[in-house]
Image (tube, rainbow, N blue to C red):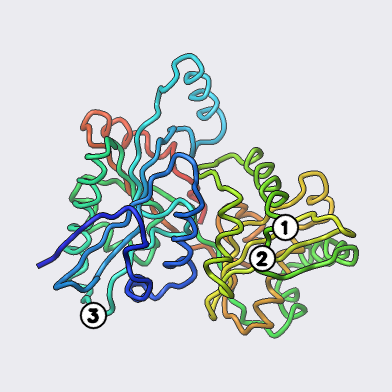
Amino acid sequence: MLQVSVVDSLDGVGRAEWDALSGQTLEGYDYLLAVERASLPDFRWRYVLVREEGTLIAAAPAFHTQYDLETTLVGPAKRAIAAARRRIPGLLSLRLAGLGSPCATTVGLGFAPQVAEVDRPAILKALLAAFEADARAAGCGLFAVKDAPQGQQALWDAAARPRGYRPMAGLPIAALDIDFADIDGYLARLTYTARKDMRRKLRALDGLRVEIRGEVDDVADQLHAFYEATRARADMAFEHLTPAYFAGVPRLMGERALWVLYFQGEELVGGNLLLQDGSALLDKYVLMDPARGRALNLYFISWFTNLRLCLERGLGAYIPGQAAYDNKLRLGCKLTRTSIYFRHRNAAVNAIMQAFAPMFAADPTV
């Protein structure tokens, strides 16, 4: 018989049993614990655990927060809702329960290796039922599954659709296979125009000093200031990260997390937080001085620095994160779809939201 529970901290869950579920260490136990301890404003953390005879066989992180519907909108619709909210505070703002982590690439659902594929939909249904019951008790009306990967689509369709969830496009995941011997081999695969442009942009590297390290306490405030500047310019911003996040991730993850810092003379002009697991390098955040970062081509310099790290460390894939897809496609990435599944507990509100779901799709580009 399944025992399903919802807890508010990973401290009471064993690291080994959590990480054994999915086999994914990039955003596993230590990363999620760093997020939990980072004191992100307006988030309440939850973890849904499914046990059988005391053994953890499935789990997923979750959260509760206040969600403004224009968060994942761009353009006129976003401006219209923002204007309406100025007139009527609280309009189109809902209490959200999300399955997944706002700071992770995918939903993070994991199963123990011994759980057969045929049994997983029933286990996921039990997990979803506990997630929803906990959310209702906290006053949440909107339930969502954040960024279910394409490889799990059949599983989520089988478990979530019968409960009234509707899927819509989430942010695709970009990835580049490191199947070339060196940077010249990589450049040779790009178009002539892209290759010429990259060589020109990389000249700025001659005027920069690059440091790779984990400890960033001495520059954490500067990195956070770069983050705030980036967030202020972003079309979409959901979570609001803190200095404790940027310092805490490498502190808890050790060698599996690293910062690449870029200095012009003695002045910090940018930083890149990366995660690694022995097979892939995941780019979490590129932060830069808003006045100088673009002029120094730091986005593209960091890209090539990360490719060199992959080559030096024998990593097979570079995952440069979500958003900025035009650049990623131009530089050879392939995109994998993700889906957001959602429903509202109020039938009338649910019908309206599902009718307008295409307006709120995070990014349908694939």
Q: Quadrant of residue 185?
A: bottom right
Please determine whether, in this image, residue 213 is positioned above or below residue 86: below
State the CA–CA distance, disc 3 to disc 1. 45 Å
Percent x, y of residue 319: 57, 67
Q: Secondary structure at mark 1?
A: helix
Q: Please, what is the three-letter code of the amino acid marked with disc 2?
A: Glu
For marks 3 and 1 on the same chain, the one whose residue lies earlier in the sequence: 3
What residue is drawn where x is 56% and y is 60%? 248
Residue 114 circle label? 3
Quadrant in which residue 218 is drawn: bottom right
Disc 2 target residue:
215
Sequence-first disc among 2 and 3: 3
Residue type at mark 3? Gln
In the rendering, at what x and y percent does residue 106 appear? 43, 59
The residue that appears at 37% across and 62% down in the rendered structure is 11
Q: Which residue is mark 1?
A: 218
Question: Could you tell me which secondary element the residue under label 3 belongs to?
Answer: loop
Q: Quadrant of the N terminus?
A: bottom left
Q: Does the residue at mark 2 contact the one at mark 1 (Cβ under 8 Å)?
A: yes
**Label 2 residue SS:** loop
Q: CA distance from mark 2 to mark 1?
A: 8 Å
Q: What residue is at 83 percent from the left and 49 percent from the top?
A: 292
- Judge by depth and name the residue closer to the eye, 157 or 47: 47
In this picture, residue 351 sits left or right of residue 327: left
Q: Nearer the viewer, mark 3 or mark 1?
A: 1
With respect to residue 43, does 212 lie above or below?
A: below
The residue lying toward the viewer, choosing from 284 and 248, is 248
How far apart are the two marked residues, 2 and 3, measured between alpha carbons? 38 Å
The x and y percentages for residue 165 are 26, 46
